[in-house]
Image (cartoon, coloured by chain):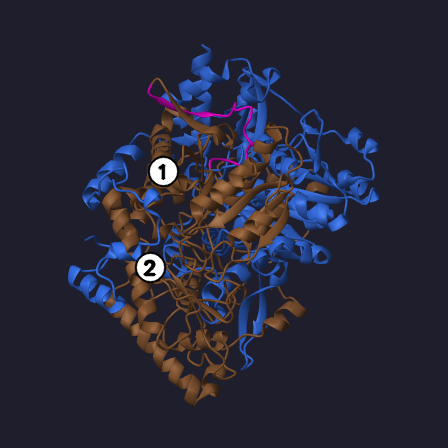
Chain colours: A blue, B brown
Amino acid sequence: MNKYVPLTLEEQDYMLNKIGVDSIDDLFSDIPLNIKRQDPLKINESMSEIEVRQWMKKLSDKNANLEDYTSFLGAGSYDHYIPSIVRHIASRSEFYTSYTPYQPEISQGTLQYIFEFQSMMAELTGMDVINASMYDGATATAEGAMMAVRSVNRNKIIASGTMNPEILKVLETYCHFREIELEIIPVKNGKTDFEYFNQMNQDVAAVIVQNPNFYGIIEEMDEIVVKAHENKSLVVMNVDPISLGLIKSPGEYGADIVVGEGQSLGIPQSFGGPYLGFIGATQKLMRKMPGRICGLTEDIEGKRGFVLTLQAREQHIRREKATSNICSNQSLCSLMAVVYLSTMGKSGIKEVAEQCITKANYAMNTLIETGLFKKAFDGPIFKEFTLVSSIDPKVINEALLNNQMIGPLSLGKYGDDLSHHVIFAITEKRSKQEIDAMVQVIREVAK
Amino acid sequence: MRHGNQLIIELSKEGRKGYSLPKNDIENLSADELIPEKMKRNTQPDLPEVYEVDVIRHYTNLSNKNYGVDTGFYPLGSCTMKYNPKINEDMAALDGFSKTHPYQPLSTVQGSLELLHDLGLKLSEITGMASFSLQPAAGAQGELVGLMIIKKYHEERKDFKRKKIIVPDSAHGTNPASATAVGYDIIEVKSDKDGGVDIEALKNALDDEVAGLMLTNPSTLGLFEKNITEVSRLVHEAGGLVYYDGANLNAIMGICRPGDMGFDIVHLNLHKTFTTPHGGGGPGAGPVGVREDLVEYLPVPIIEKKDNLYWLNDEKPKSIGRVMHFYGQFGVLVRAYTYILTMGAEGLRRVSEAAVLNANYLQSQLKEHFHLPVDAFCKHEFVLNGTDGLSDVRTLDIAKRMLDYGIHPPTVYFPLIIDEALMIEPTETESLETLDQFVQVMLKIKKEMEENPELLKQAPISTVVRRLDEVKAARKPVVKW
């Protein structure tokens, strides 16, 4: 007997009798003997709740957590402030124990927050339509590329080399197996090399650019959009939603498709997942979108309600002709984002962005003033910046770790010429005092 | 009621706010001067201006318009809507797991890596595979990864003519959609009269252009594929690989294993069999396991152990590549791991036994009253024809009427090979009393169907909204405020 299975032995006998068999084994008589197991699985024996807790606590205590350590690390996962109420709402089991809202009459809770998520993200990004969410920012980017290929009937994607290298790798995997040609636009001084666009040809379905880019620089998007559109190619922008409190939105730039990672919007860092990919587009491309979309409608009495809509694009209807094989979304993570965005609201999202940009610039200036770092690239930054260190980044990060700090990302693994490049991330959570303390540790190392 | 019937934006009032941030202590820099004019946002997003109580009441009231496993019976076939243990949630929320950055120094995340490594070993043993990647974010991405591995395997053998994937007509829609997403053509084979793979049809479909076969076992009809070893032998003989869609693993844990049936690649749905919550549509997790000679194709990074230290190996030349930004849905994996610790080997076997017993009991009670197209012992689920031509009442109407009785309806109109399908999966976490109540409701609805069909066509009548106009929603889509 166990606590999640209510079946008693008496009930078991009663039910077997009703079915008309003698034993549970009889119900498995259709399984050929040669593949039936006689021995138990070689995994653990069952554990009591107390034992499970002790086991798990022991594992989790082997990690350093960001409650105890101060983080200066970003590159796709960020230590932003998460209001308490986010966890409280996301812990309501009416939300988290429900399935996909295929029965809309008893799923209005899920459907309405998805509609609100779509609305808030459409506001932030300036796009006409955002779907109900994707696995993460990297796969959303790959889906954006495939959507572009479908939409314009060309088979080549060009993606900026200033994008996060891991996102590029995911894009590479998806393109390889889908047999889409992928070319990487060279990097020039930390930005997308504009020269490259002069050799762009008619095969290009879309240009993908991340803004702010991997190195933290805000890209010159205006020119890129003009060039791409002259070539009748689509523009796919990968954006940090937090930056949109201040920075021009993809909609304002004239982008056709927007993708990105929404972890910054109230979702725990949780060692890399689950996160919140998002994808959106102009009205014109709405029916080419992958994944779920929630729409407004009314019931037979004229009462406002919400349903999943445009399902004729999806796999459960279209099977091999679907726009994507995706058949879930990161619903619970989108709920966290919707609670976050409601809580922060119009002024909060701007204030977070302002604190990020001022604190990041302060940290950058202070680090450069030590004489131990120089700027890797020119250009305006948002919450991340890349420096070239005169000290081995490994030494810096060890010293910071000894002082309960998680240091910047070292770029050594991305190329030998980058062995002394580091990317710092500074969010609104970092105080001047924390930044000064971090700089002080590095000064000490240099002595 | 002010909260819950409006959109959150409709509660907005200028000047209200629901957050508090520390005062910005950087005084000599201004955000406005740090961004070039042409890169500045021109119009502010129309986000709500509400205070904390508004947000709490609004979303609490929305949650009350939802139905979850914690609300009541949820016999949604193919989805395994079992109870989601609460300790799983607590463990995933531990600071050491939820508050860590994926790129922290390896020495500071050894606990997480050990957990993932151990979970991979346990899943390998449960399924009989050589090794697992825990990265795929969902069942559909697991399929995508599995198909990429199939494609890579043939590419490495320089066998470039294999362009076809065989899928039975009873398969989940994701199977063909995933195969298309990696550039394969689909060959659909018909099922035999018992809903199994038609061996003759399979033989006819097999040739040297077939890359592989995708199969769910037990099938989407809830029936075990008796000829499974023959099926896998035939596909292997033709040079193809056999892919296991793990949607229905809940029926066979500890009893038999996909690896022993001849499957080469397996994906699991941790949100089905391993009790992680469905979350209103996600996040789930779809780990992929493979046989020994396919291990080198698994997505990077791979967790390895060297000198008592776990580390992430990105340098795998034959890998299909990276498929997620980081390491998959870690928080979901923590929950599944917690569940396996709790259950142990005996517990998991008991889960499958009870799931199958519950399904057969329900089937035995309902088949006297509803048409059961394939009358055999089922595994964890079974499929009825809901209407049987008694009136013009449709299966959809039965489902909607069930809402009035406070039960989540079974899956309807799937699998496609059964008319007016009603696919029922009770799971092992439901009691005999609940099953009996469900039978009573089904009988009541059957009676209503005969005596007052109009009632069913009007249903539901007691829900917060009645039937919604889906045609209107799709014709002129309104997808934001």
Q: Nearer the viewer, residue A116 or A366?
A: A116
- Please say whether residue B301 is visible from this viewpoint: no
Circle 1 residue: B97
Give the structural element (helix, strand or loop) at label 2.
Answer: loop
Q: Quadrant of residue B407?
A: bottom left
* The image quarter in which residue B422 lies: bottom left
Pointer 1 and pointer 2: residues touching (CB < 8 Å)?
no
Residue type pointed to by label 1 = Phe
**Mark 1, secondary structure of its residue:** helix
**Residue position marked by numbered label 2 in the rendering:** B427
- Residue A398 to residue A317: above or below: above
Say which of A344 and B194 sits in front: B194
* Outermost residue to the left: A10
| Residue B412 position within the rendered picture, expressed as x and y whole percent measured from the top left | 48, 68
Could one spot residue A131 in this view of the protein? Answer: yes
Neighbour class for label 1 at 10 Å: few (<14), some, many (≥20)? Answer: many
Q: How many marks?
A: 2
Identify the residue at image location x=30%, y=57%: A27
**Corner quadrant of residue A140:** top right
B478 and B262: which is toward the camera? B262
Residue B277, placed above or below residue A425: below
Main SS, magenta region, reads loop
Residue shown at 45%/39% (left/top)? Answer: A429
> What is the quadrant of the C terminus of chain A in the image?
top left
Question: Circle 2 marks a residue in which chain?
Answer: B
Magenta stretch in the rendered image:
B308-327
B56 or B178, which lies in front? B178
Q: Residue furthest front?
A: B200
Residue B158: percent from the left, percent from the top? Answer: 64, 28
Q: Residue B316 in magenta?
A: yes
